[in-house]
Each structure stands twice: as structure tokens, then as C-alpha cells.
Image (tube, rainbow, N blue to C red):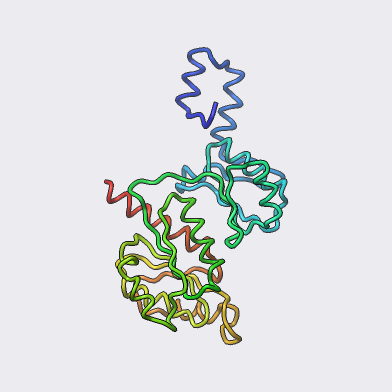
Amino acid sequence: MSDPSLESLLTAWREERLSTAELEPLLRERFAKTAEVLDVLLDLDRQRRCGFPEVVYGQGKSVEQLLQIISVQQTAGQPSLITRCPPDMAETIIGAYPLASYHPIARTLRLGSLTALGMPRVIVVTAGATDRPVAEEARETALWMGCEVEFLSDVGVAGPWRLIERRERLQQADAVVCVAGMEGALPSIVAGWVACPVIAVPTSVGYGSNIQGLAPLLSMLNSCAANVAVVNIDAGFKGGYLAGMIARQVARGREG
């Protein structure tokens, strides 16, 4: 029985297609709030509470842990997202789950995705091509959340006309993720063109005074644009997740 609902399980039990002894472990497995997986206590109730399943940070975990986590999530009917997943582990996981997709630049592995009402639209913008790994992590996260995602690369402030040429596309977004290193000025400029939240993601791209991303982080925190919010350095997942949540809410409002 694939992804059984409570109603379908109880119907099968009532029609005597399932015995009480068979029903009990299925209920425990399907509706458990947590699962112990090789020293990991997986939160299976997060989707009910927060709308999204637990996302797994892959770095530092073993491939055995990741395989077991995916197995538990899939059994619970939850899509899986692993961030910072090493390529060799991704290869092993895809061997076990051929429908999984791995993005080597973002270092994310996805298996399944959430559904959403009203086609939530996220646009991911990068200041430079070197910011792409962080931006791709944001894109993959928003895709997993069921969003339509457009990617605009290399439109930084060194060539401001490049952004102006794309302003009409930006204005169609429900939320924007703006990824920039160096001095981190791009989110403030983007925010001046759009009527939606801009999630600014500073990167550690830059020369010495960039201070490994601290300079753009401080620039973004000091933005004069009121619709800019800032996440941590190189935190593409966080930027994509927040943008996805916002876009889904906006799209739901359009449908409602």
C-alpha cells in the first residue's frame, strides 16, 4: 500500500483486508512523530506542523544514515531533500533510488517534491557567476517546495543595465532570492524594482576586504530598501526555503 492515508487504512481494516495485528505497525510507521535512524532522531511531524518535511544536512553524515533517512521519509509519504550532499554519497543513493536527482553544483539531492496551489513563482538572481553554487542551492530548495523557479545569473552592479533589462521578469515574482558577494549591493537595487520580499544571501566570494562574506552580510543588513531580509553567509538553502514559503502563501491567496 503506497502512502496510505488514515482513512484508507481504517477502511481496509473495516473491510477485513487488514487484521488488527497488521494495522498497528502500519499506523505506527505512517503516523509516528519521530523515527530513530542510526543515531539520527528524524522529525516526521514537521510537515504537519510547519507545512514542510525535515530537510537533511548531508555533510558529516554517513551514506548509510542518508539511505535510511530517505527510506523512512518515503515510507511516510514525504519528499526528501538532502543539502551539502557529497557526490560519492549521491551516486550510491541514486543507485538505490533511481528517481532521485542530484545537482552537483548545488550539492543537493531531491527525491519527490511538494505540491502547491497557484503556481508560486520564485526568481533567483546572482550578482556573478561565481555565486552560482549558493544560488543553485536556493533554486533546488524552492523547486523541492513545489515552486516555479526562474534563474537570472550575472546581473551584478558592475553592469547595471543587465538588471534593468530583466526588470519585467523580476516584477512577476512572488519572492526573489538575491545572491551576491563582493560588496553585496545587488539586493538593495533589486528591491527597488519589485513589490515582493527580497531574500538576500551574502556569499564568501570576494577579495580580502570581503572578509569571507562578512562585508556583503553587513551591507545587506544595512540596506535602505525596506523589503530586504537577510540570511547567513552562503546559506542558499535558507534563502530558497524562505522564498518558497512566501511564494506559496502568495499563490494560495491568489487561489483563495
Q: Is residue 195 above or below residue 23?
A: below
- Across the whole image, how many numbered discs are drawn on residues? 0
Residue 165 in percent (x, y) is at 34, 74
Residue 192 in percent (x, y) is at 32, 75
Q: Quadrant of the N terminus?
A: top right
* Drawn side of residue 62 relative to residue 114, left or right: right
Which residue corresponds to the image point at 57% horizontal and 81% vertical from the top-left? 206
Q: Is residue 50 above or below residue 105?
A: above
Which residue corresponds to the image point at 32% horizontal and 55% vertical from the top-left? 250
Q: Nearer the viewer, residue 110 or 237?
A: 110
Which residue corresponds to the image point at 53% horizontal and 41% vertical from the top-left? 78
Most extreme residue toward the top, as rendered? 16
Q: Is residue 25 above or below residue 60?
A: above
Q: Nearer the viewer, residue 15 or 132?
A: 132
Q: Is residue 124 above or below residue 18?
A: below
Write down the quadrant of residue 210 in the picture.
bottom right
Residue 30 in percent (x, y) is at 55, 32
* Drawn side of residue 127 relative to residue 110, left or right: left
